[in-house]
Amino acid sequence: MAEDIQQKLEKYRTAPFDARFPNQNQTRNCWQNYLDYHRCQKALDAKGVDTAPCDWYKSVYKSLCPLSWIEKWDTQREDGTFPGKI
Amino acid sequence: MAHPTQLGFQDAASPVMEELLHFHDHALMIVLLISTLVLYIITAMVSTKLTNKYILDSQEIEIVWTILPAVILVLIALPSLRILYLMDEINDPHLTIKAMGHQWYWSYEYTDYENLGFDSYMIPTQDLTPGQFRLLETDHRMVVPMESPVRVLVSAEDVLHSWAVPSLGVKMDAVPGRLNQTAFIASRPGVFYGQCSEICGANHSFMPIVVEAVPLEHFENWSSLMLEDA
């Protein structure tokens, strides 16, 4: 499983088509992957397991989300004002 | 780019734009034929001494001029829908670029591998070198590899803007807080110009878009150089 993730990450070009977000508005795609990465990190950290599988979500949100949005959300998480549930 | 007194579209630089161009030729031909026919009939009616005394019951012509327009509309609708669905196909992009609209410039982010971001300001008229185009050139161009599907995510940091490049057949509104996706393939290397297409304040006419399509190796060299400069 871990090797598959590694392979997927090595062959990563850009965020692939996600059938959950097939249309023009990709806002939710960016938001969801950002949430999924941080939730994955939190969950695997809590279990004390290697968080490498979470890197897929990180690659995707880095491809999709504008840098200003990522900075804003990172700051909000540090301040405790992040609107999403992680 | 557009040239003075131009009436038609700019040369197509993407497969979608080629389709749109041919469809426009088809639809315009139909429109011109119908208009010519109508104009001819009007002049014929106006310049005849004959009058029609039998003004009731013309079943045959009524049937013809009901069925024929329906057929013509179908002949327009079928290619139109074909292109609509073609544009909607699921594509597998090789590259994602974010185009962010600001007052009054665009910024481009290439973040698939490293965090490459830069602003793209219009070159003021007094700073143009000979051969450059007024109100269209920018200091940094959005460079893309040719013949590769590129996904562009368009958004804005302040007010509404719109990212448009006519020769690629692309226009997408830039809405703050929203990520609008569009895609294109540059079928040939070249430089393609566009302008902001949503009123956004005093310098709305002065925030152009320049896309430069180059072979992949050139794109890779350019992105390494841009990363070093940043």
Image (tube, rainbow, N blue to C red):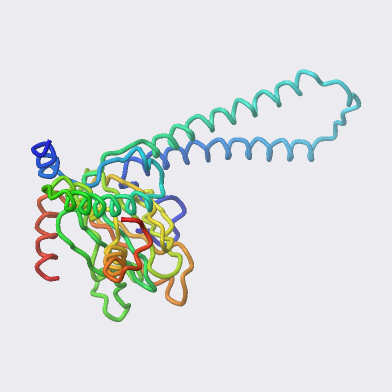
Screen quadrant of the C terminus of chain A: bottom left
The image quadrant that residue B6 belongs to is: bottom left
Q: In this view, does B162 lie above or below B24?
A: below
Q: Residue furthest front?
A: A47
Q: In this view, does B21 lie above or below A79?
A: above
Residue for point 28% across, 63% down: A70
State the residue in front, B187 or B152.
B152
Q: Where is residue B172 in the image (x, y as percent from the top left)?
A: 41, 54
State the residue in front, B45 or B167.
B167
Judge from the rendering whether residue B176 lies leftward or rightward of residue B69; answer left or right. left
Q: Position of residue B121 (x, y in %)?
A: 30, 72
Screen quadrant of the N terminus of chain A: top left
State the residue in front, A45 or B43.
A45
Q: Is residue B41 above or below residue B165?
A: above
Q: Is residue A83 above or below residue A40?
A: below
Judge from the rendering whether residue A10 lies leftward or rightward of residue B86; answer left or right. left
Judge from the rendering whether residue A45 lies leftward or rightward of residue B36; answer left or right. left
The image quadrant that residue A16 belongs to is: top left
Q: Which residue lies furthest to the right in this view?
A: B53
Report the label total: 0
Q: Residue furthest top?
A: B60
Q: Position of residue B152 (x, y in %)?
A: 31, 52
Residue for point 28% across, 50% down: A36
State the residue in front, B150 or B147.
B150
Q: Position of residue B125 (x, y in %)?
A: 32, 77
Residue for point 27% across, 58% down: B211
